[in-house]
Image (tube, helix red, strand yellow):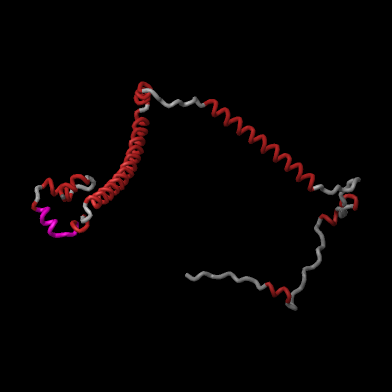
Amino acid sequence: MAEVQEEVSNPYNARKSWHTPDKPKMGDADGLFYPEQQATLDEEAPEEDAQPRKRTNYKKRYDDLKKHYDDKLSEFKQKEQELIAMAQAAQPAYAPPKSEEELESFKQEYPDLYNTVESVAHMQSQRQVADLEAQLQAMRQRESEVLRREAESTLKQRHPDFEDLRGDEQFHEWAKEQPEQIQDWIYNNPDNVTLASKAIG
């Protein structure tokens, strides 16, 4: 079913030549029996103050408001400091357990907290041990490198033909025929110059 649209009057019709303005108001029926009351000038006009109105001093008002705001702010800060001091005074001073007996009583009283602290301490100690092991390994490598270089320089002093022997295939063939102990002196001996010198000699 189609909706019927309500017609809206055209506001421009008020300006057409056939439009007649409303008649002047004639009054109501009470006007025939009672005289029309007209307000006197005294009733209409409000009483004016005897004194002229003062201009508002906005700077003074601002200064007063600012002073009030600053006073309240300092008062709130002082109350806050007092509350913080009261809260700190109310808290008991915590002393961590130091002796074995204190630790044992702490463990009995707070087992969950003790286990958590212990696991955190273990993780931190493991991390520190891993860091120390890495540093120690690097130091060992540097030390072995230094010892190997010193041993090589000493071996070169004792045997000036050491570099030639190192690259000589006949020497390596000879070393393979030697007992295992002498082979260890030559190949698995990074820092003992005496044994390497004996094997070469």
Task: Judge from the rendering whether residue 150 lies leftward or rightward of residue 61; answer left or right.
Answer: left
Q: Is residue 99 above or below residue 67?
A: above
- The foreground one among 63 and 30 is 63
Magenta stretch prevailing secondary structure: helix
Q: Within the image, what quadrant is residue 81 found in?
A: top right
Q: Residue at x 34, y 28 (%)?
A: 111
The verdict on residue 76 being magenta is no
Q: Residue at x 28, y 48 (%)?
A: 150
- The foreground one among 40 and 29 is 40
Q: Residue at x 63, y 32 (%)?
A: 79
User: Where is residue 140 drawn, in percent x and y?
Assistant: 29, 44
Q: Residue at x 90, y 50 (%)?
A: 42
User: Where is residue 13 drawn, in percent x and y?
Assistant: 70, 75
Q: Residue furthest top?
A: 101
- The foreground one among 150 and 127 is 150
What's the magenta region?
A: 166-176
Q: Is residue 107 above or below residue 73?
A: above
Q: Residue furthest bottom?
A: 17
- The foreground one among 39 and 111 is 111
User: Where is residue 169 drawn, in percent x and y?
Assistant: 14, 60
